[in-house]
Every structure is written in C-alpha cells, then in structure tokens.
Amino acid sequence: MIDQRRAAVLAEVETWLGTPYHHLGRVKGRGVDCLTLLAEVYEAVGLIPHVDLEFYPPDWHLHRGDELYLNGLSRYAREIEGPPQPADIALFRFGRCFSHGAIVTEWPRLIHAWHKAGVLRYDAIQPNLAKRAVRFFDAFR
C-alpha cells in the first residue's frame, strides 16, 4: 500500500497529463518542462518549498558536463538504490550529464514532460530511455 504522501504526488502528477511541453514553463495545462514539472508537483503536495530556477538553455546538457540537474535535485531528494518506489524520481542521462527527470508511477512506468509530446505516461524500457543511464531519488526525507 502506498503511503498518503506518495499517493498525493501520484494524484498531482496525473493532473498535469496532457500539458504541452514548454521550456521553463510552470503552468498546468499550458506548458512545462521535465524540471519544472518535478518542482511544481512536489511543491504542490508540500514536500519542497518553491524552487526559483535560473535561466538555462534547452540544450545545456549537450554542451556542458556540469551536473546542474543532479546537483540541484540533490538539495531536495536523496539518491537511492533501485528499484524505485511510486512517486520517486528517475533521472536519466542525456547528452553529457544527467538531465531528464521523471516521476515513477510504478517502475518502469513514468510520467514526465517530453519535448515532443508534453506530459505523458511512458515506460522506461521504451527506446528513448531504455539504454540510458538512470539514477533514482526519494524526496520523502
């Protein structure tokens, strides 16, 4: 059985399904990216405070090796061994660093903001994610 806090995260992320992808967007139904989706969902359920994000180019991960996403996420969640639990975070490596986050619904199923499709349900064994390195995080400290 899933505890109430995890259930709240899953219920909240479901309300974002169908939101278009928009880099740095933070408005349900209008636009969000993979980072702002996580920030908005975990803030909405009271697990983290509001996170002010500095501007970052949409392709930052292709040109830099700095682990900006990983380092930022580590301030709000602790890294865990897999398999992840529902409402944990999966962080995938794209480009030169870990740069794409998703909320686990039941591993390997996820909800995330995908640049070509917006917020959708996805499976980590599908081609875009299957061979990518992944790390898991728990925001329920």
Image (cartoon, rainbow, N blue to C red):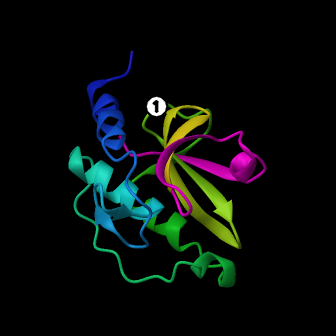
Q: Give the residue type at disc 1.
A: Pro
Quadrant for the C terminus, please: top left
Report the residue that reaches farthest toward the top: 1
Which residue is depicted at the point 32% across and 23% down? 3
Residue 126, position as x, y percentages in the image: 71, 42
Q: Is residue 19 above or below residue 85?
A: below
Give the image location of residue 25, x and y in percent.
34, 69
Taking the image as drawn, is residue 110 in sight? yes
Disc 1 packing (10 Å; few <14; some 14–19; many ≥20): many
Q: Position of residue 36 (x, y in %)?
A: 37, 63
Region of the chain picked out in magenta, as a range? 114-141
Q: Which of the pair 131/74 is nearer the observer? A: 131
Q: Say above or below: 35 vs 106.
A: below
Check disc 1 and report the residue beneath it: 86
Can residue 141 be seen here?
A: no
Which residue corresponds to the image point at 47% horizontal and 60% vertical from the top-left? 34
